[in-house]
Image (cartoon, coloured by chain):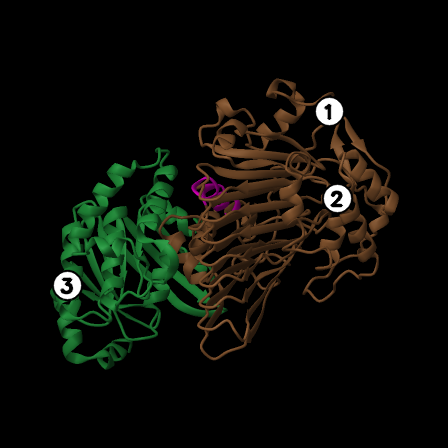
């Protein structure tokens, strides 16, 4: 198994947000996690990627045979865990090219490899940006500075393509996207999806799942998964609404 | 395992060792401690100076006696006992130097360690260097090349002997000895420095640079730089400096004067890396410097670029007097303070010529317990019509125990001129750090990346030779400033 969360309890500032979360993910799978606002979806993403301030009070996160809860965020990233952010942050004065080269070289250093050659790097950039229909011009712009909502999300998927993670978490990647951008982003994800990697797609709406078809859908409420099923569960949820979920809680 | 306890990423402040803190063991000639007329005369005698220069010094000294150390800056300056300082120290020379072979190997080694090769054969980059240790110039390289173009570039002391008419014509014309306390002090006791004259219509083909090194203990460094670009001339000039790591504070009070005649252009770049003191604020250089240029002729241009990372205290306002019509003044600054460093730095743009333009880009970065102030004046004379100024003063805070301050002064004497001022204060956010971490970039690297991005507009103005060094220096200066 590639990735497994066991009985995860996470608190922020003493308030428990995740209350016994369980999830098993095999390589090659796409899992969708759906649920209403404030149910702990983004906390889940932060806890998996090792963000500070998220206190794990109980439980384990297993990835490639290791419990990673004591690993730093950058170690987890270099081990192949990637988060496509819901709100990608601006870094003024740092070009995407410089940012990506720093990231790739950090990963190579972690793996004991020499820095990437400029020629190879630029070649890879060109290939990967074509995947999400990004023009050359965007690459010389500063990270997320003045980007439209669509550009930001495309840039996240582009970075994912560059870093070739084994576990990618897409946090509300569909929010703020028009239908064309949504299609481009989803196409990017589908091209990157192989039998060796896995995706966890966090979303509010069924809409994204028309483009990125999940193997499993989990409904989350109040810090844990309350129902799991196949892709039809997303349609059922869309039809019945989140009030129905509350009912499932008994 | 993450070594940072959660939640206090920007709390802990440690100091990266200062790379240039070594001391050269070399026989040094000192004069007695303290300052009086006899000392001024003695310095002048040591330098073998003509009578007029001694008079210049004495006039300055007598004026200095009437002045008080200024206290208007946002700086907490410990008491300085001006009688407890040695005003002249020089590596002992055996004889007049004719070639590099005669330079003391210890001295060559010192400059090699600093990355400044005085051996022209070994220099690939084509930068002429005047190397100054304590009160004296050690060696000026590339003399032959420069002479071919009629360019004069030599130690100040040499220039006084070889080109007294030029030195006399320009010395003290931009920064008179009456200018301020530290300028008066420098004018009285200045030891050495660089003199540079670019003749009419000559574009200096190589970068000129002076490298200042304080070595001796208990001494002050008072160098004087004078750069003259005659009509239509161009020169790019760089200045670097370091000092040994010592527990006592050392005083550095320099003067730089720049004169740009009609259609001339001078680009002056500094990477200031004097010893900043240790992480508890012990030791370090007190850096009180007066730098000013005058655009005397029409369409002349002076551009200051500074990267300030060193010194315990910095008091420095490289300025432009825009006398010529259509003249241009520029000031690009990155000032970084960490631990207990204090900096009060900025510029003055004095518009006297019509249609003169100025640009000010200041990027302050504060970390640790440091205080970092921008202080700037833009003055437009009533007759200086259609002037333009654009000022941008940004502050970046790393942590919550440091301070960033902005003191902009504007005096506009007519209504055809346009002034713009933009200012921002920001922090490196946890979101930015986490974003970098999530892409595999560790904290130190992330800080370096973000800070260099923040300072990009200024770093881009540096000559290639300096830009790489400055980028590294920024990262090193802030190393350990975040957890």
Residue at (20%, 69%) from the top-left corner?
A: A177
Instruction: Classify residue B386 by image quadrant.
Output: bottom left
Write down the residue under mark 2.
Answer: B53
Q: Locate residue B376 relative to residue A62 in the image: left or right.
A: right
User: Spatial distance from mark 1 to mark 3, Cα to Cα?
Assistant: 87 Å
Vertical comparison of A35 with B234: above or below: below
Disc nearest the viewer among 2 and 3: 2
Residue B450 visible in image: no
Disc 2 from disc 3: Cα separation: 92 Å
Front residue of B463/A189: it is: B463
State the residue lying farthest toward the front. B165
Q: Position of residue B345 (x, y in %)?
A: 60, 59
Question: What residue is disc 1 on?
Answer: B93
Foreground: A95 or B83? B83
Name which of mark 2 and mark 1 comes first in the sequence: 2
Q: Position of residue A9 (x, y in %)?
A: 41, 63
The quarter holding residue B316 reads bottom right
Which residues make up the magenta segment?
B463-474
Q: Give the chain letter for green.
A: A
Task: Output the chain of dot 1.
Answer: B
Say whether residue B253 is left or right of residue A205: right
Q: Is residue B315 visible?
A: yes
For the stretch drawn in magenta, what is the main secondary structure? helix
In which quarter of the view is residue B371 placed?
bottom right
Res A162 label: none
**Residue located beneath label 3 in the image:** A230
Label 2 crowd (10 A; few <14 / some 14-19 / many >=20)? some
Q: Are marks 2 and 1 on the same chain?
A: yes
Nearest the viewer among A239 and B9 is B9
């Amino acid at each position: 198994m590639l990735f497994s969360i066991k009985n995860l309890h996470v608190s922020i500032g003493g308030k428990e947000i995740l209350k016994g979360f369980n999830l098993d993910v095999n390589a090659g799978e796409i899992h969708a996690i759906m649920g209403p606002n404030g149910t702990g979806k983004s906390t889940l993403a932060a806890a998996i990627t090792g963000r500070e301030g998220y206190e794990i009070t109980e439980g384990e996160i297993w990835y490639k045979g290791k419990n990673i809860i004591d690993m730093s965020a950058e170690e987890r990233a270099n081990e192949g865990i990637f988060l496509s952010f819901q709100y990608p942050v601006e870094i003024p004065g740092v070009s995407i090219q410089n940012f990506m080269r720093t990231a790739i070289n950090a990963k190579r250093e972690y793996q004991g490899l020499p820095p990437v050659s400029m020629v190879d790097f630029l070649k890879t950039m060109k290939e990967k940006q074509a995947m999400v229909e990004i023009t050359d011009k965007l690459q010389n712009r500063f990270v997320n500075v003045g980007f439209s909502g669509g550009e930001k999300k495309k840039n996240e998927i582009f970075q994912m393509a560059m870093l070739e993670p084994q576990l990618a978490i897409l946090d509300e990647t569909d929010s703020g996207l028009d239908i064309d951008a949504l299609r481009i982003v989803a196409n990017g994800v589908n091209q990157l999806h192989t039998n060796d990697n896995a995706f966890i797609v966090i979303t509010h709406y069924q809409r994204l799942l028309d483009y990125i078809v999940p193997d499993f859908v989990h409904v989350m409420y109040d810090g844990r998964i309350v129902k799991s099923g196949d892709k039809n569960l997303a349609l059922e949820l869309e039809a019945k609404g989140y009030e129905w979920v509350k009912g499932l809680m008994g | 395992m993450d070594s940072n306890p959660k939640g206090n990423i920007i709390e802990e402040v440690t100091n990266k060792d200062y790379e240039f803190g070594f001391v050269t063991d070399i026989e040094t000639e000192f004069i007695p401690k303290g300052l009086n007329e006899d000392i001024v005369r003695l310095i002048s005698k040591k330098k073998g100076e003509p009578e007029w220069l001694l008079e210049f010094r004495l006039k300055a000294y007598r004026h200095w006696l009437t002045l008080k150390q200024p206290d208007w800056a946002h700086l907490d300056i410990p008491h300085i006992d001006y009688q407890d300082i040695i005003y002249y120290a020089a590596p002992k020379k055996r004889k007049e130097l004719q070639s590099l072979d005669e330079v003391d190997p210890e001295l060559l080694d010192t400059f090699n360690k600093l990355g400044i090769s005085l051996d022209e054969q070994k220099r690939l980059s084509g930068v002429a260097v005047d190397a100054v240790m304590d009160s004296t110039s050690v060696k000026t390289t590339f003399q032959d090349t420069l002479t071919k173009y009629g360019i004069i570039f030599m130690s100040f002391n040499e220039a006084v002997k070889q080109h007294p008419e030029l030195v006399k014509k320009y010395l003290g014309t931009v920064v008179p000895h009456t200018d301020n306390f530290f300028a008066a002090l420098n004018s009285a006791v200045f030891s050495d420095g660089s003199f540079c004259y670019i003749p009419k219509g000559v574009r200096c083909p190589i970068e000129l640079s002076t490298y200042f090194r304080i070595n001796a203990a208990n001494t002050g460094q008072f160098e004087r730089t004078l750069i003259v670009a005659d009509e239509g001339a161009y020169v790019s000039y760089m200045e670097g400096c370091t000092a040994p790591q010592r527990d006592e504070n050392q005083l550095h009070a320099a003067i730089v004067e720049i004169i740009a005649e009609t259609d001339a252009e001078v680009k002056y770049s500094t990477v200031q890396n004097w010893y900043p003191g240790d992480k508890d604020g012990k030791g370090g250089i007190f850096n009180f410097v007066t730098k000013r240029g005058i655009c005397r002729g029409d369409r002349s241009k002076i551009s200051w670029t500074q990267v300030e990372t060193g010194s315990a205290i910095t008091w420095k306002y490289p300025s432009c007097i825009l006398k010529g019509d259509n003249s241009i003044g520029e000031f690009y600054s990155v000032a970084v303070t960490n631990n207990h460093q204090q900096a009060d730095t900025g510029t003055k743009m004095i518009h006297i010529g019509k249609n003169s333009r100025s640009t000010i880009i200041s990027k302050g970065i504060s970390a640790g317990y440091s205080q970092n102030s921008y202080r700037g004046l833009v003055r437009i004379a009533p007759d200086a019509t259609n002037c333009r100024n654009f000022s941008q003063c940004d502050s970046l805070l790393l942590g919550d125990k440091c301070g960033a301050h902005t003191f902009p002064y504007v005096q506009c004497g007519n209504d055809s001129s346009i002034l713009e001022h933009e200012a921002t204060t920001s922090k490196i956010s946890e979101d930015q750090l986490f974003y970098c971490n999530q892409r595999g970039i560790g904290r130190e690297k992330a800080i370096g990346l973000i800070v260099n991005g923040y300072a990009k507009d200024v770093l881009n103005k540096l000559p290639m030779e300096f830009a790489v060094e400055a980028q590294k220096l920024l990262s090193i200066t802030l190393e350990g400033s975040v957890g």
